[in-house]
Amino acid sequence: MKDSLLSWEEAVTWLKNHPDKQQLVKFCYYDDPIEEAAERFYKSQEWEALQQKISPYLPSKVLDLGAGRGISSYAFARIGCQVTALEPDPSPIVGYQAIESLIAKTGLSIELATEYAETLPFPDNSFDIVYGRAVLHHAQNLKEFCQEAARVLKPGGIFFATREHVISKKEDLQTFLDNHPLHHLYGGEYAYLLQEYQEAIRAANLKLKTSIGPFESEINYFPKTREQLKDEIVSILARRFGKKLAIVLSSNLQIQKLVTQSLSRKSQTPGRHYSFLAFK
């Protein structure tokens, strides 16, 4: 790692300034205009899958933790939710000034708070949904983060942490950090064991409904599409049943579920994505 690290804004700017990194920039929704990036997320398979997971609770009062540029806040607001975006970074590129720009350009109603998730400035039982996209692994204190999320969540409310980096053993952490495209620049990435996330959520007196594996939902396997994953399922099934039967079997939702669960269990890739859905 470099002796002098960049800020998160500087690291993302470095990424955006490299022509060979533009696909990654779009996958991360760092591209401009910001309102077009936010609309692309709103139309994504990831957002579609997320809505399906929590549809009985929408629209509602939502807290978006570590909101970044506000793409998720935008999507929640687009479907009529009362949204508060929590983002302590003031950056006009990746922080709350970017969210202010998004609000100004779209006219959507999004409240803004600039504190950290470990010390939320809200009363108990304030929100129906507390959500964070790829934010829990950045927590300064994982247990305090979850405890604060639980505190401001209404009884019966949802805590949904998506796209969290998972490692199989502590020795895998450095491999993940070495392979991350920006960690060497700003030093802010991390990953936890699966059970560390689960224990922190349960310690906050939240009821963990499900831990969604890396291949079990578009929420986790984006930027891969469901069509690309289905092609992979066909290839796996074809080894045993032949191509024609594999194509037929791959259309069966139960078989899809069994294969993706198996792939998720077998995956040992450092930093693979899991999502956690819990209730208060």
Image (cartoon, rainbow, N blue to C red):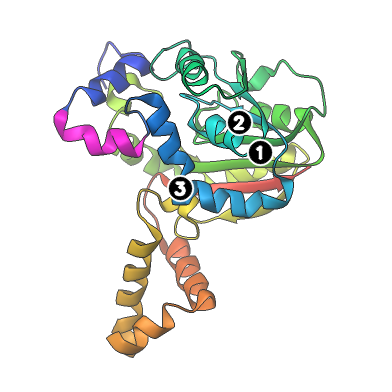
> Which sits earlier in the primary sequence, circle 3 or circle 1?
1
- Where residue 204 sits: x, y (%)? 74, 36
Instruction: Quote the CA–CA distance across marks 1 and 2.
Output: 7 Å
Q: Which residue is mark 3?
A: 273
Instruction: Quote the CA–CA distance across marks 3 and 1.
Output: 17 Å
Q: Which residue is mark 2?
A: 142
**Residue depicted at 56% across the width and 49% down the height:** 50
| Span highlighted in magenta in the image | 19-28
**Residue depicted at 78% across the width and 40% down the height:** 205
Q: Which residue is mark 1?
A: 200
Residue 26 within the segment the image draws in magenta: yes
The image quadrant of residue 141 is top right
* Amino acid tagged 2: Leu
Which SS class for mark 1? helix
Instruction: Quote the CA–CA distance across marks 3 and 2.
Output: 17 Å
**Residue depicted at 17% across the width and 26% down the height:** 18
